[in-house]
Amino acid sequence: MLAAMSTPLILPAASPQATALALQPGLWIACAALGPAADAAGVLCPAAASLAARHYPALSRRQAFLAGRAVAATALAALQQPTAVGRAADGAPQWPAGVVGSIAHDGAQAVAVVGLSRQWQALGVDVEPDLPLPEDAASLVLRPEDETALQQHFGLEARRYGRLVFGAKECVHKALHPWRGAWLEFDAVRIEWQGRTAESGEWLALPVSAEAKTAFADTRLRGRWWRQGGALFTLLTVSA
């Protein structure tokens, strides 16, 4: 878990050039604007171009994939690790030996977090536009307990923060799937909210289904969120 969770985390602006920030020793996060990062992917991670062409014929999906690989390569370089990231059969990133990580992107930017596996057991990151969660998505993502927690913590602004529930649950999946082999649906987990400022706060993931309770065994999944540059970021770190 990151120290000083209540301290706002401010990333470098999502500029054309991917920029990495040290969160703690052995843990780096990087972000960049989507289009320019995709263009830079061929230099930062040449193997990504062939992967993108093979698996993502649609231009928007291909650019998002390449941007994710570019920011991952930037974070890995800061970590002084090999920058090539493979692709598993299910589409998940395959990290270099000794590294754990997570990649996310929205329509404007890409973000990646990487850490040394001897220090970090699992990582999850997500970025979403700072907009209310569409109703069709909300019906799939939000449990009744999630809606109650949002209303209790965010009051009249609860609807605005529905995407944070989505992001937190995405972080849980990205952390637990490679670590414990769990593939949890949105309704298998609920999210509670803790310390908060206007632009950042903390969240706690709690298991609901039997599968989730098994996947959560002996661990406490507590993350953080922050608003920046028209986006909502969520981050989950599990120390080794």
Image: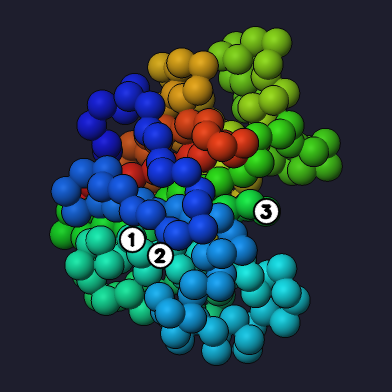
Residue nearest the observer in this picture, 107 or 120: 107
In the rendering, which numbered label is found on residue 75? 1
Check residue 107 in the rendering and tell me which mark sits there, or answer none. Answer: 3
Amino acid found under the numbered disc labelled 2: Ala
Q: How far is disc 2 from disc 1 in space, using C-alphas?
A: 5 Å
Residue 58's place in the image compared with 13, above or below, is: below
Which residue occupies the extreme right position in the image?
136
Do the residues under discs 3 and 1 have CB atoms within 8 angstroms?
Answer: no
Instruction: Characterize the local packing of mark 2: few (<14), some (14-19) or many (20 or more) Cα atoms within 10 angstroms.
Output: many
How far across and how far down the image is residue 66, in percent?
55, 72
Percent x, y for residue 10? 40, 35
Question: Where is residue 89 drawn, in percent x and y?
Answer: 53, 81
Vertical relation: 184 (above or below) 139: below
SS state under label 2: helix
Give the residue at x 73% y 74%. 59
**How many labels sit on residues?**
3
